[in-house]
Image (cartoon, rainbow, N blue to C red):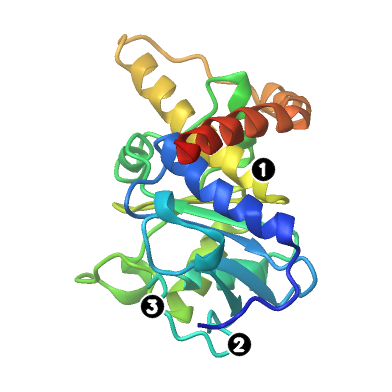
Amino acid sequence: MGALSDADRDLVEDLVVANHILFDQGVVDAFGHVSVRHDKRSDRYLLARNMAPAEVTRDDIVEFDLDSVPVNGDARAVYLERFIHGEIYRRRPDVMAVVHSHSPTVVPFSVVPNIKLRPVCHMSGFLGQGVPTFEIRDVVGEGSDLLIRSRELGAALAQSLGSALIVLMRGHGSTVVGETLRHAVYRAVYAEINARLQSESMRFGEPVIYLTPDEAAATFKNIETQIKRPWDLWKKRVSQAHAR
């Protein structure tokens, strides 16, 4: 087993907690993953070994370079889709954390081209920056397993993400990014919540009133100054659950 180099202990602990929060909030189940850029090496990132997020501990964290190769001689089994993380970090130096999930209410928005995921709630103003959809058929044709299992596919996904904060993956799920780990977790949770609210609103059969671009920008700017509040709540909840 390889050892982490000099990553901050609190950052590693937060990554463990992030895995547990995303499971507790219904964003990931046995599948899905979250990573954080190394705090001292911008050309490396931290991600759990291949396992269910709810079971991740500090000892399960693996260090990768941007080619998504484990470093320090770590030979443990790793996620097939680790290239999502490495290629986004390579393309987006502003991104410090990445969440990939198959959250159930988000997936339908990836397969109905004429229905876009849009902010309906002030907690989800970050969606106002746009929600592109990645179509894997455009890269490798029909017949793939939809997984991002190579650097080529990771780079194509990162290109589709562009400067946005979330990209949908047709028939697969979504990938969310953040300038901190807490931002990425918050956005992954509220992307799923917004998808539920939007889906329920559409059932009424009346036009949905979405946030205007100005409203989305204002709520994005102001609400995300409060991210510590949900993070502390979610962290306490999962810490108590793991203490039992």
User: Splitting the image into 4 quarters, where does residue 208 fall?
Assistant: top left
Q: Label 3 sits on what residue type?
A: Ala
Q: Which residue does the image show at 59% across and 66% down from the upper left?
A: 88
- What secondary structure is found at the residue carrying circle 3? loop
In this view of the protein, which residue sits in the foreground, 233 or 135?
A: 233
Question: x%, y% of residue 10?
Answer: 73, 55
For the residues marked 2 and 3, what is the alpha-carbon distance in whole angstroms? 14 Å
Residue 166 seen by the camera? no
Q: Are marks 1 and 2 in contact (CB under 8 Å)?
A: no
In this view of the protein, which residue sits in the foreground, 134 or 19?
A: 19
Q: Using the image, tell me which numbered label, if any, was put on residue 72.
A: 2
For the residues marked 1 and 3, what is the alpha-carbon distance in whole angstroms? 28 Å
- The residue wearing badge 1 is 183
- The residue wearing badge 3 is 77
Q: Residue furthest front?
A: 244
Q: Which residue does the image show at 32% across and 38% down from the upper left?
A: 104
Q: Label 2 sits on what residue type?
A: Asn
Q: Is residue 150 left or right of residue 123?
A: left
